[in-house]
Amino acid sequence: MGKVKIKRKSTLIDMTAMSDVTVLLLTFFMLTSTFLQKEPVTVITPSSVSEIKVPTANVAQILVSPEGKVFLSIAGEADPTVADGAWASEPIRKEVLANAVSEYNRLHPNKKVSLTEKDVEVFSKIGTFGVPFQSLEKFLRMSQTEQDKFISDMNNPQAGIPIDDNQNLEKPNEFQIWMRAIYSSGNDNLQASMKKGEGIAVKAGKDTPYSIVHDVLDNLQTLKMNRFSLMTALKTEAD
């Protein structure tokens, strides 16, 4: 009796459906993810048990490097379609810059800062910034690569926003000018968030000198910004 031949079936698997699902998932995660802002210096925050997340919208973040340099970043509405995008991050940065430069020029009539429309446009696209007002024109006219190198050099005396223990708000220091400008940007949601303490986040390294962190907190209290968040890393069992 002859052997029964079993019909061989193809081992080819159609991966089209799986590829479609993979692309859809990748697109979903790209559209819903929040990308971290590029920062001029890596800061290792201290550990804590707090699980409260710092908001990514309507917030002013103060970054303090281990070397004592102070930087700022400003985020507006998460949804750029709100109010026709009037208070998305880029428009609000333009408003903050205009307010800050106007106040600085009023206080320093002999050292006025003069910015072009192109300078303002460049500033609106910068995530984290921090230079003295007198270096602002020079900084905004650099290429992005040069800007990154400029404020990432912790030995550069022009990197970082000048700050001291000033308590005379009739003659505010540069950090105080910027924080006032952010608060008075005209974005009611950001202002309300700052009043609740959710709109101001301080990020300092665990090795950052206490004196500079104290100056930052003292400046905020002088400005009556008494509620703010301190950014920390979640404590692990090893800690």
Image: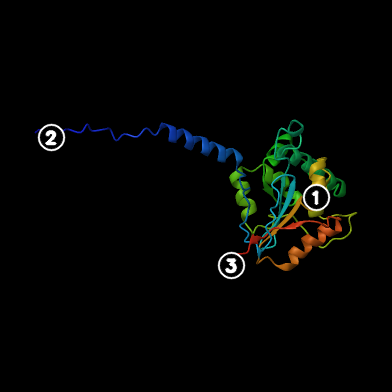
Contact between marks 2 and 3 (CB within 8 A): the answer is no
Which circle's residue, 1 or 3, is located before the other in the chain? 1
For numbered disc 2, what is the local secondary structure? loop
Q: Nearer the viewer, mark 2 or mark 1?
A: 2
Q: As shown in the figure, which amino acid type bears the numbered disc 1?
A: Met
In depth, the one of 19 and 6 nearer the eye is 6
x, y (%) of residue 32? 61, 40
In the displayed image of the protein, which residue is found farthest to the left?
A: 1
Q: Which residue is mark 3?
A: 237
- Residue behind mark 1: 194
Q: Earlier in the sequence, mark 2 or mark 1?
A: 2
Q: Quadrant of residue 227?
A: bottom right
Give the left or right position of residue 30, taking residue 173 as reference: left
Q: Gap between marks 1 and 3, in whole Å?
A: 33 Å
Q: Nearer the viewer, residue 226 or 66?
A: 226
- Give the percent coordinates (x, y) of residue 140: 68, 43
Q: In the rendered image, which residue does mark 2 sit on?
A: 3
Residue 164: quarter of image? bottom right
Q: Secondary structure at mark 3?
A: loop
Instruction: Specify the amino acid type for callout 2.
Output: Lys
- Tell me how far mark 2 sits from mark 3, CA to CA: 66 Å
**Label 2 with label 1: CB-CB less than 8 Å:** no
Q: Quadrant of the N terminus?
A: top left
- From where the camera sits, is residue 180 visible? yes
Residue type at tag 3: Glu
